[in-house]
Image (tube, rainbow, N blue to C red):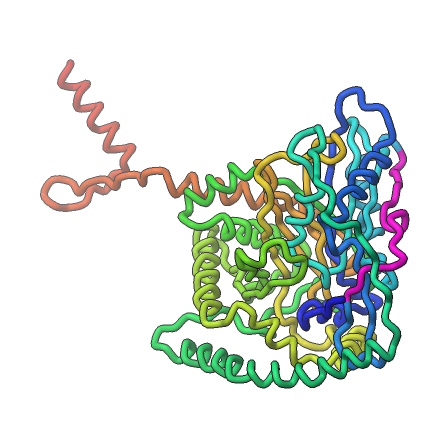
Amino acid sequence: MERLSGLDASFLYLETPTNHMHVGGLWIVEMPEGYKGGYFDTVKKLVESRLHLARAYRRRLLMVPLDIDHPLWIEDPDFDIDFHMRHIAVPPPGDMSQLLDQVARLHSRPLDRSRPLWEFYVIEGLADNRAAVYTKIHHCCIDGVAGTELMVSLLDFAPEPRNVAPPDKPWVPERAPNDVEVLARAAVHGIVKPMSMLRRIPKLLGTVLNVGRRALEPGASLPPAPFQAPRTPFNRALTPHRRFAVKTIPLSQVKAVKNALGCTVNDVVLALCSGALRRYLAKHGQLPDKPLIAMCPISVRSEEQKGELNNRVSGMLVSLATDVDDVIERVAAIKESTKDAKESYKALPADMLRDWSLFAAPLVAARAARLYSRYKIADYHRPPFNVVVSNVPGPSFPLYLGGAQVLHTYPVSIPADSIALNITVQSYTDNIEFGLIVDREAVPDVEDLADMLPLALAELTAAGSAKDKPKEKKAKPAAGGRPSSLGAGRITETVEEIAAKKAG
């Protein structure tokens, strides 16, 4: 039995009937040549054999009566893998549009809190000898980095599944404690928690002072402040419905832009999002005069914490410089903004969000989230930022699932009230995979936005190529120090005429 941290529990408290707090992934797999057999049964057997590598898959929530404390994790005494592993299909021969519509519908459904908080769908019926796997798991279980580690533990490095050693001890479910036992634990934690909070107050005050000192430094350049972002069509209250779009960008082209413009891969990813958003909003006549602000999650997971299935995240606000027309100047502005954000972030402790989350009362936080959602308060104030852009590192080598090669791994993340657009990016093999999840009413044509990412890449590539070209030399002044009134072309012609006369 284990109590959720304040940060993990906050993803439960923020969940409402319209604001679902699960993350997911869409894997496109290619079946081996001449494959015959039940792919779903193969995958189910493989996942079942590796459940001991994914502890989150057999844990379920145990809520504290009256919500007086954070929930507990227990090993589910009624665990049933058939509830979580599901087999569906699109009408064959299915295409990507049909598949993405299906994923959007599945992602629009909340998870059942009475069971372990995950689902695993094998989707068949696709053309070109392909299938898909859509997974979702509640954000209270994992963050992006932990999700990637979980993915790699379930997948293989070759078509032939590797031999995975069984657990040292057979899995034994826990007895679910009764309400009296849970309340007794909460009472003990209620004594310890205030002491822990008091110990953190000096640290939190120090954080505020550090940020204040940096703001007062001469010439200090600070990142964007919350609630200063301009309003856009995707900064509004949510509905329960989603749309999903994907795009693959070659990593080699991103690195070429990075080298040409002297920035980082992450700067190029932000510039791609900026260029696509500029085009999309300009097309709809809604491009703000002020720059859009992105919130970029940051992993604060240390080496010792790798392998833990929980949340170790913070975040920084970055300007996307969508108000800058010139591409090179826009990239430079994004680069400067990320630099400022990182400098300010250094003044903050890595576990700041975990510290602040200790002060959130479960009952109050959950009630506040529901009221905020029910009364659509997001429609009446400026957004804290415009969009989430999350860049998650993935494996640089191909992976396999049940003998089928994984061709693409598209992330499926979380839109939120006031932030109805989430762009999550994951590297895989030689590509960068974009997953755009949106509120259906806010961005009904998200496919158009995704299609603008390659256009933004072409724009960046052209800017990088133009920057590398040597500048044309200006014509030297004519003899006597006076500038010539002739253009460069006319000077050439005059020299040729003189040479011709001499030859004659």
**Residue in the foreground of this view, choosing between 164 and 206:** 164
Stretch of the chain drawn in magenta: 73-91
Query: What is the total number of numbered labels drawn onto the structure image?
Result: 0
Q: Residue at x 80, y 52 (%)?
A: 171
| Residue 261 image point, x, y percent | 42, 47
Front-most of 29 and 267? 29
Asked whether the viewer can see residue 171, the reply is yes
Q: In the picture shown, does residue 326 fall above or below 349? A: above
Extreme top residue here?
504
Residue 1 magenta-highlighted: no
Query: Is 200 positioned to the left or the right of 222 in the image?
Result: right
Percent x, y of residue 242: 79, 56
Q: Is residue 400 left or right of residue 291?
A: right
> Is 77 within the magenta?
yes
> Residue 356 occupies which quadrant of the picture?
bottom right
Which residue sits at x=81%, y=29%?
A: 127
Please identify the quadrant where the N terminus is shown: bottom right
Left/right of residue 496 with respect to residue 425 in the rendered view = left
- The image quadrant that residue 420 belongs to is bottom right
User: Is residue 31 placed above or below 381 in the rendered structure?
Assistant: above
Please indicate whether residue 208 sits to the left or right of residue 355 in the image.
left
The foreground one among 122 and 289 is 122
Residue 446 visible here: no
Residue 270 horizontal/vertical position (percent): 54, 53
| Residue 379, percent from left and from top | 74, 73
Q: Is residue 382 above or below residue 319?
A: below
Which quadrant would the C terminus be assigned to in this image? Answer: top left
Give the quarter of the image for residue 293: bottom right
Residue located at (25% from left, 27% from top) = 493
Decide which of 408, 465 is in the foreground and name it.
Answer: 408
Q: Residue furthest front?
A: 169
